[in-house]
């Protein structure tokens, strides 16, 4: 017998079924609530609302757990390549060696984009934010591949998925190189998926490119750690845009726009900007810690705490170790990195942050690593997007496979009751 919750409203007893997820989480099924009672729920930010059933990612904020398709993020980060995690998220299983080789070869074969896309790129000034450019170029893919992107089933969608996985790193590297006044690169098909990303971004036109193995290894792990994170703002955006039966490419472009916000993917950029602000103000770290604790002060300590995690973000623990490896190879220590290390130490020793479980999150460490790798601050969110792309694709595919209805939240109207023109 299915569990249910029962309540009385207007003299009528209402039963709402309860169903459970495979990890024991429970949800009240309110799909018939409005039809039977006329009521809707009120949940700003959807903090208590399950918008879908998903088999992609499991997250337990209280326990600090993150899993993809049943594998822990620690296991995937330590033992898998990013291309394997991409395959896992989208197709549901880790590839065999032959499947991985075939998958990577398919991507290599599609690693060209139409030259006319450069016209869109050229229309932006150098000062344009890379996320603005990347969202436009991604949406522009629709015009150059009109036969791709429409849902016809996961097997038939493979060409669209491959094309997006192949083109997206090219477009991301273009945004980086434009901002630095460098000629545009195309893919080097002799390299791994992550190695090719590093090549396209960092190769100088007048020099041979020699990848830094420590940084390529770090980049592989960074991308894995950002690959999916359940129903966050950008993933939910991809799903809700796709629920209107918008094609894959424009749905991903919408996710990019959502990710751009400083409370989401832009948070790692905000961390660096905050650290620069602290240094410019005399590097008085305690002053800024006190400001963060003052409820009357609008200042926020970026990179600490998380919307979901009430424990250490498991990704931040892994990133801290990655940061040590990348920073350990540097001859000169960046003053921003020194400030960050001291800020982290003081916050972790402060009872205010300890009692509220405001630990350093993924954004705190990822920005420091990207900076150490000489990636410009404005490119941080693009790097996040490179990692999150397979998660967005998986979420979009699952939404269409489940034939989810078009997203259409209700509201509580609080405006004028009625007005008349005199």
Image (cartoon, rainbow, N blue to C red):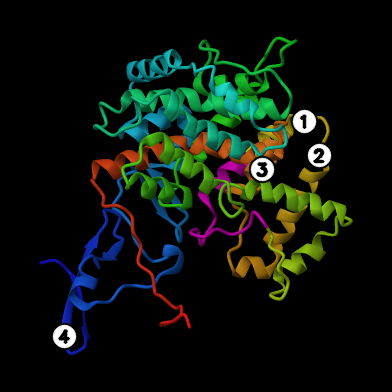
| Label 3 vs 1, first from the N-terminus | 1
* Disc 1, SS: loop
Q: Nearer the viewer, mark 4 or mark 3?
A: 4
| Label 4 vs 3, first from the N-terminus | 4
Pinpoint residue 335: horizontal percent, then vertical percent: 83, 43
The residue to which callout 3 is attached is 367
Q: Which residue is nearer to you in this view: 92 or 349? A: 92
Marks 3 and 1, how far apart at CA: 16 Å
Q: Residue at x 16, y 83 (%)?
A: 13
Q: In the rendered image of this protein, does residue 397 appear above or below residue 263?
A: above
Q: Quadrant of the N terminus?
A: bottom left
Q: Nearer the viewer, mark 2 or mark 3?
A: 3
Q: Residue at x 22, y 62 (%)?
A: 19
Q: Nearer the viewer, mark 3 or mark 1?
A: 3
Q: Which mark is residue 12?
A: 4
- Do the numbered discs 1 and 2 sit on residues whose CB atoms are within 8 Å? yes
Q: Is residue 329 highlighted in magenta?
A: no
Pinpoint residue 90: horizontal percent, then vertical percent: 35, 34
Q: Which residues are magenta?
A: 302-321
Which quadrant of the figure has residue 249? top left
Number of other residues with Cα within 10 Å of mark 4, as a class: few under 14, some 14 to 19, many 20 or more: few
Marks 1 and 4, how far apart at CA: 70 Å
Residue sticking out furthest to the bottom: 11
Marks 4 and 3, how far apart at CA: 55 Å
Marks 4 and 2, how far apart at CA: 67 Å
Q: Nearer the viewer, mark 1 or mark 4?
A: 4
Residue sticking out furthest to the left: 1
Q: Which mark is residue 330?
A: 1
| Label 2 vs 3, first from the N-terminus | 2
The residue to which callout 2 is attached is 334
């Amino acid at each position: 017998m299915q569990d249910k919750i029962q309540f009385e409203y207007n003299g009528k007893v209402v039963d709402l079924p309860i169903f459970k997820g495979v990890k024991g989480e429970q949800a009240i099924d309110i799909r018939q609530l409005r039809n039977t009672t006329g009521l809707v729920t009120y949940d700003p930010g959807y903090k208590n609302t399950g918008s879908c059933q998903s088999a992609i990612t499991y997250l337990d904020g209280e326990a600090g757990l993150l899993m993809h398709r049943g594998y822990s993020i620690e296991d995937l980060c330590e033992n898998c390549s990013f291309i394997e995690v991409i395959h896992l998220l989208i197709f549901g299983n880790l590839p065999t060696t032959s499947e991985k080789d075939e998958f990577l070869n398919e991507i290599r074969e599609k690693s060209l984009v139409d030259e006319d896309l450069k016209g869109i790129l050229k229309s932006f000034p150098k000062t344009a934010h890379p996320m603005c450019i990347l969202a436009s170029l991604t949406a522009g893919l629709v015009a150059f591949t009109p036969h791709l992107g429409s849902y016809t089933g996961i097997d038939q969608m493979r060409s669209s998925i491959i094309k997006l996985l192949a083109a997206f790193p090219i477009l991301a590297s273009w945004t980086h190189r434009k901002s630095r006044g460098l000629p545009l690169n195309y893919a080097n098909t002799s390299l791994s998926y992550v190695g090719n990303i590093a090549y396209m971004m960092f190769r100088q036109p007048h020099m041979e490119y020699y990848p830094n193995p420590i940084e390529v290894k770090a980049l592989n792990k960074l991308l894995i750690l950002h690959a999916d994170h359940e129903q966050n703002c950008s993933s939910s955006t991809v799903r809700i845009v796709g629920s209107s039966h918008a094609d894959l490419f424009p749905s991903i472009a919408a996710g990019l726009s959502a990710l751009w916000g400083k409370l989401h993917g832009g948070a790692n950029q905000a961390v660096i900007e905050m650290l620069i602000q602290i240094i410019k103000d005399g590097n008085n770290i305690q002053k800024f810690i006190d400001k963060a604790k003052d409820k009357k002060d609008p200042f926020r300590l970026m990179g600490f705490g998380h919307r979901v995690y009430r424990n250490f973000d498991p990704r931040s623990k892994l990133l801290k170790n990655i940061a040590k490896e990348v920073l350990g190879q540097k001859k000169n220590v960046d003053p921003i990195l020194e400030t960050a290390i001291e800020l982290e130490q003081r916050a972790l020793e402060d009872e205010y942050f300890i009692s509220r479980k405001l630990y350093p999150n993924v954004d705190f460490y990822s920005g420091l690593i990207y900076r150490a790798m000489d990636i410009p601050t404005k490119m941080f969110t693009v790097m996040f997007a490179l990692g999150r792309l397979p998660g967005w694709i998986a979420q979009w595919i699952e939404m269409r496979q489940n034939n989810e209805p078009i997203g259409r939240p209700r509201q509580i109207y609080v405006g004028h009751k009625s007005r008349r023109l005199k």
